[in-house]
Amino acid sequence: MKGKELLRFETMLACVLVLEILVFSKTGSNFATQGNLFEVLRLSTEIGLLALVMTPVIITGGIDLSVGSALGLCAVVMGKLWRDAGMHPALAAVCTLLLGAAGGGLNALLITRLNLPPLIVTLGSFSLFRGLAEALTRGVDNFTNFPKSYLFLGQGYLLGVVPAQVPIFAVVAAGVWLLVHRTTYGRAFRAIGFSPEGAGYAGIPVGRRIALVYVLSGLVSALAALIYVARVGQAKADAGTGYELLAITAVVLGGASIFGGTGAIHSTLLGVFALAVLKIGLTLSDQPAELAGILTGALLLAVLMVEAVARKLSARPGRISSANVKVTQT
């Protein structure tokens, strides 16, 4: 997908987002309020963080199905280090971030060194991380009663208005945006997504660039776990269940090609907010919770169909022009 096509996707998604806001402002109680705006931001932080780091993964032509399970494992480890090991919450948080980076490093090692498909590798780590979380808790242990200083990260408000996790999300979003759109790394990600072999011939260290996106994915998954635990006030083995699918959905809704080579951070953010507004708007409108999943799936399928049609239309002129060239040469 080229830049103009991606812009069309962004415009279409922005229109969907505006339409959602207009509809739910009429049907949802207290939807069109400043408080609800910040609530949307607060509740979409974890999914947003996962979607942000999923974007460069998908741009390189990969996928990471393990982010939700990594969040669950890191949440449990955070609780276990604080409660059972007696660590200070800050030290436990640092160790949790390191664990997340190590989990991403495991994915990177298997993908880059053994040349295994990202889908299969991250499907395996998806089960591995969730299984480890279940083993650490024996399926029933629940970590609660965290210090108020830590819970402020997910439940507190700066100046009494802005949720405490929003500045963290903004910093991560800005950092990933700069990485993808304003550095040579970002250009390398796109080159790898279009053609790994061609990128290698161009002198790009393909293995190291791919490893970077998976380590970053694991690291930010751990950060999302810390915010998740602080927001809900507990850590269980089922934390983050299904989050990987929501993150991928947000990225694809933003116009990133599942074939790699194309994607934008600001487009992903539009996808995240479209999903968040849809879910919260339906809740405030007293609609069935299942309707959010139905509409999300329908919207995703519609985007994929539009992408497929756009690919066919963009390929058709190329074939015609090639034929014309051959006729001219003859």
Image (cartoon, rainbow, N blue to C red):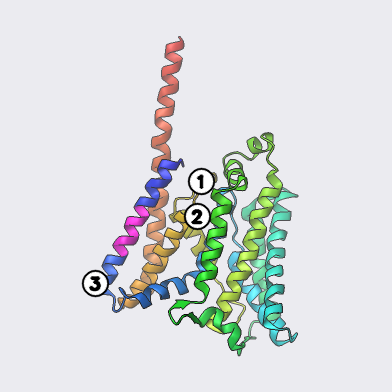
**CA gap, disc 3 and disc 2:** 30 Å
Mark 3 or mark 1, which has the lower sequence index? Answer: 3
Residue 234 seen in the current view? no
Task: For mark 1, give the secondary structure.
Answer: loop
Vertical order, 319 against 54 (above or below):
above
Label 2: few (<14), some (14–19) or many (≥20) C-alpha neighbours in 10 Å:
many
Q: What segment is highlighted magenta in the picture?
A: 12-20
* Residue at 64% in and 38% down: 199
- The mark lying in front, picked from 3 and 2, is 2
- Report the residue that reaches farthest toward the front: 159
Q: Quadrant of residue 82?
A: bottom right
Q: What secondary structure is the stretch in magenta mostly built from? A: helix
- Return the residue nearer the eye: 282 or 153: 153
Q: Which mark is residue 265?
A: 2
User: In the shown orientation, is residue 95 left or right of residue 126?
Assistant: right
Residue at image mark 3: 26
